[in-house]
Amino acid sequence: MMLALALHTTSPELGLALSDFSHESRCQTWDLGRSLSTHLHYHLTEFIQPHPWSDLTFIAVAQGPGSFTSTRIGVVTARTLAQQLDIPLFAVSTLEALAWSYHKHSLIDSKEAGSIDIAVEMPAQRGEIFTAIYSIRVASQGLKGSSNEGLPEVTTLFPDTTLTPERWQTILQTWNRPYQLITAETILGSSVTSLLELAYAAWQQGQRPSWAIAFPFYGQSSVTELPKSS
């Protein structure tokens, strides 16, 4: 039996999703704020019941960008679980999950869905914004029990980057393809289901990433080393 778990901790809202992509699929969010670090493991333990940890086939985690501390906590937790269970860990961009969530809920019935790029912006620090642009289409194979018509196929056209609003506007103004701009909210846990679906699509393509290559992404460059958890 396949069973996968997703964790989304890049904002004050914790999002957890669990699915076997056939009969069971559920998700839940908690607005934990600064309590995320102290309540994450409790909610994880309760949420996965009645399944034992050994039932998991793979784990997905939001790697950022987002809150520095919350993102790090989620990635460290997911890495630890994947290492102990010896299962793959998919580290997925927060912005990519938002783009897919928008696509499946807003564009899935549009004939133009496959020809419109999705630009995502999200507030960062010091007046800057996190940005990315994706092209998304839906494959023919469906996700059973899901609201979308099939597995997402995502192409990154402009990678996750931190920019000034002025620089971002210049990029959008010179973009030579139709696009839809999404301004992300600061509460992100509800996109955890999209996170899990993106990981499942990668799994179906044969990807089996090791926990050792999953790192937080804070908007500038990937972190190549994590402090050891106490």
Image (tube, helix red, strand yellow):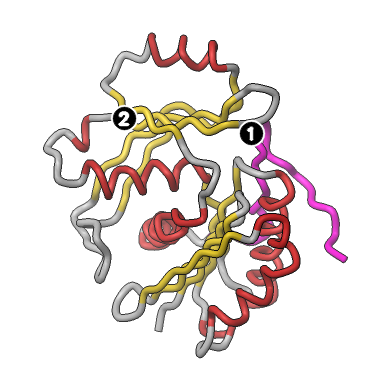
Assign the N terminus to one quadrant of the image. Answer: bottom left
Check the image and report above or below for 59 versus 212.
below
- Measuring from the top left, give residue 29's x and y in whole percent: 51, 64
Q: In the figure, is residue 36 to the left or right of 26?
A: right
Which badge, 2 or 1, is on the more N-terminal residue? Answer: 2
Q: Residue at label 2?
A: 117
Residue at point 56% right, 66% down?
Answer: 88
Rate crowding at label 1 as few (under 14), some (14 to 19) or many (20 or more) other CA atoms within 10 Å.
some
Residue at point 68% right, 33% down?
Answer: 221
Q: Which mark is residue 147?
A: none
Q: Is 20 in front, or is 189?
A: 189
- Measuring from the top left, give residue 38's x and y in whole percent: 75, 67
Residue at point 46% right, 9% down?
Answer: 170
Asked whether residue 55 is drawn in magenta, I would say: no
Give the amino acid type for the residue marked by disc 1 in the picture.
Gly
Rate crowding at label 2 as few (under 14), some (14 to 19) or many (20 or more) other CA atoms within 10 Å.
many
The local secondary structure at tag 2 comes to strand
Which residue is at the far left? 111
- Measuring from the top left, give residue 210's x and y in whole percent: 61, 61
Magenta residues span 209-230
Assign the C terminus to one quadrant of the image. Answer: bottom right
Q: Is 101 in front, or is 177?
A: 101
Q: CA distance from mark 2 to mark 1?
A: 21 Å
Asked whether residue 228 is drawn in magenta, I would say: yes
Check the image and report above or below for 46 versus 219.
below
Q: In the figure, is residue 56 to the left or right of 74?
A: left
Q: Which mark is residue 219?
A: 1
Whether residue 168 is visible to the viewer of this picture, yes or no, is yes
Residue at point 21% right, 36% down?
Answer: 114
